[in-house]
Image (cartoon, helix red, strand yellow):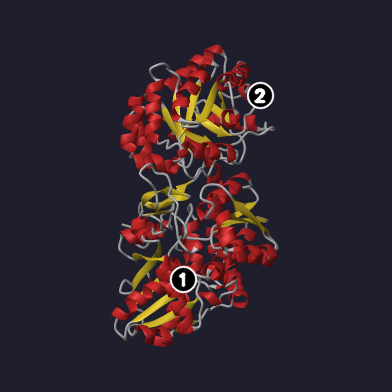
Amino acid sequence: MKHKFDYPDEKGHFGIFGGRYVSETLIPALSELCDAYDEAKGDITFFDEINKYLGDYVGRPTPLYFAEGMTEKLGGAKIYLKREDLAHTGAHKINNTIGQIILADRMGKKRIIAETGAGQHGVATATVCALMGKECVIYMGEEDTKRQALNVERMKLLGAEVKPVTSGTRTLKDAMNEAMRDWVTYVRDTFYVIGSVAGPHPYPMMVRDFQSVIGREAKEQIFEKEGRLPDLLLACVGGGSNAMGLFYPFIQDEEVKKTGVEAAGHGIESNQHSATITAGSVGVLHGSKTYLLQDKNGQIQEAHSIAAGLDYPGVGPEHSYFNDINAVDYTAVTDEEALQGLSFLSRTEGIIPALETAHAIAYAKKVAPKMSKDEIIIICLSGRGDKDMHTVMGLL
Amino acid sequence: MSRIDKKFVELKEQNKAALVCYITAGDPDINSTKDIVYNLEKSGADIIELGIPFSDPMADGPTIQLASERALAKGTSLKDVLDSVAEIRNNSDIPIILFGYYNPFLAYGLEQFCKDARSAGADGVLVVDLPPEESSEFKDVLEEHGLNLIFLLAPTSDKERIELVSKNGSGFIYLVSVTGVTGARPDMNYSLEELTVEIKKISKLPVGIGFGVSSAAQAKEIASFSDAVIVGSALIKIIENCNDDLAGKLSDFVNGLSEACYR
């Protein structure tokens, strides 16, 4: 029997989740990608190159910072912040784009495309394309280009073409549809850099692998500082890449609790949220079987979150699997709670987190006071909040 | 033998490639759908593909995306489409394929869907985002209810893919003419003929070609070396842009295509 954490299988399934639900045209491209990734994994120079850039360019390892002010204020567990906001471009997304674009280069692909919600993945992709001399096209929902205007300008400055997507709900899911359409059309010379642990196999596995650097470092760092494993890991979950990156290296340490914090938007009962695992049901979207927000006819529903990066009606299939085998708990906090979380961390630690990250902070505010002072929480501080000033202004 | 199989046998005797017409069910509304189907049949269509509208039609170009949005805005569900098929069966025996994305079928329940599709009189399904390796569950239930499962092949498909599709599919093979999404294209790639020959070496199933067919001239070319010509976006455009005499305009266009399908 397969060990419960020994996934995906050779077809990309995590239990019943994941897989490769795409049109036939893309199947050979996905197989080619799988083969190229397998081959690269066996080549030490591939990792040498990734590590060189992660160190000298991204600035890894990112610090594991003991948040003394936050810990004192909440009066419970010791809180550490894994500072992905200090990575180049201001979020964890670059861990993955470095890996995928080095892979694209090995495969001889000259044109890079990506979807983006908050713009963080778009910026990280555009950045690495500038670094490596690749043509770069970013698909972004028109709605998101407005609320994340700063990131649009950053991408343009980096030489990327930003294509606003006007179909459907004009957010992340539609950007992903459009990127898939581009890929299916220019599949022979184009590499599609998916930004989350979502999409068809091998993306959920590959993005997990590239983001796992977060958890590997955090594990080493917490042993240095505390000489033991933490008690709880917290991270926000939209597609779920930063959460997967932090959780995965601890997944076999079952005594370490893990909680993924989804976006409850205006509240679960309002039906305007992005809490896919908390309130969704199983279906197929964007190439994999996973929890989704959908109506009774199987039409995908519009997600809502104040955080553009969480505003997605699906979630990475491995998260769905972790939920069903109780390896990770999933919960949700509202827009309002996230705003309070953002304000709280800014005032107590002098760190303005991204609105996405603020969801994890908000949940920490609830749970840390109930824990004892000798317990330890690590929160993935997945990104910095500069991009959100426009959204936050007037609300706080 | 399914209605689809019989149709291909019958057309072979007439030396005609099947004219397969795709329309999005519920566009402009579900009542028009059956009238459009009757019109298409009368004008020379041999097989109908009814598109099941989906909120996230990843493999479709702008024309079918918009048709899908219009149909969804009218509240068209898979259940409505099945009801419409049942009504069509009162007047027509034309083979009908339900063409869509997997999630609406899943949400309906695969078993329940097959039961209802069979009793409505549908003949097969084509699920764009369900390649053979993910299809075993659906395939078993479809087979049990005597429904065909049609798969796509693409210019990127190799021998192994052709074999897999040939082994798992029924009805016919839908060969996507170009890499890309659906949509009418003025120029087509005629090295398709070689690919069609390759597929026919491996599979006994008829091979139909679609994605981008928009004129009788293209239809004639494709009909010369394949078993079916599949037209979609070009029809949707007529429906979309039509202010009056939709029946006449569709009929003129489809008549021309149908004649072009005779070899």
The crowding category of the residue bearing disc 2, from other C-alpha atoms within 10 Å (few below 14, some 14 to 19, many at least 20), is: some
Quadrant containing the C terminus of chain B is top right
Examine the image and state in which quarter residue A246 appears. Answer: bottom left
* Residue A164, horizontal then vertical, whole percent: 61, 53
| Residue B221 numbered mark, or none | 2
Quadrant containing the N terminus of chain B is top left
Depth order, front residue of A181/A350: A350
Residue found at the far top of this picture: B14
**From where the camera sits, is residue B1 visible?**
no
Which residue appears at 57% of the width and 29% of the height? B209
Residue marked by disc 1: A357
| Residue A165 numbered mark, or none | none
Depth order, front residue of A126/A308: A308
Q: Is mark 1 on a helix, strand or loop?
A: helix
Q: In this view, does A286 lie above or below B175?
A: below
* Residue B81, horizontal then vertical, whole percent: 41, 31
Q: Nearer the viewer, mark 1 or mark 2?
A: 1
* Residue B210, horizontal then vertical, whole percent: 58, 31
The CA distance from mark 1 to mark 2 is 57 Å
Depth order, front residue of A281/B17: A281
Examine the image and state in which quarter residue B44 appears. Answer: top right
Q: Which chain carries label 1?
A: A
* Residue A205, horizontal then vertical, whole percent: 47, 60
**From where the camera sits, is residue A116 visible?**
yes
The amino acid on which the numbered mark 2 sits, given as a three-letter code, is Glu
Q: What element carries label 2?
A: helix
Which residue appears at 59% of the width and 49% of the height? A183
Is mark 1 in CB contact (under 8 Å) with mark 2? no
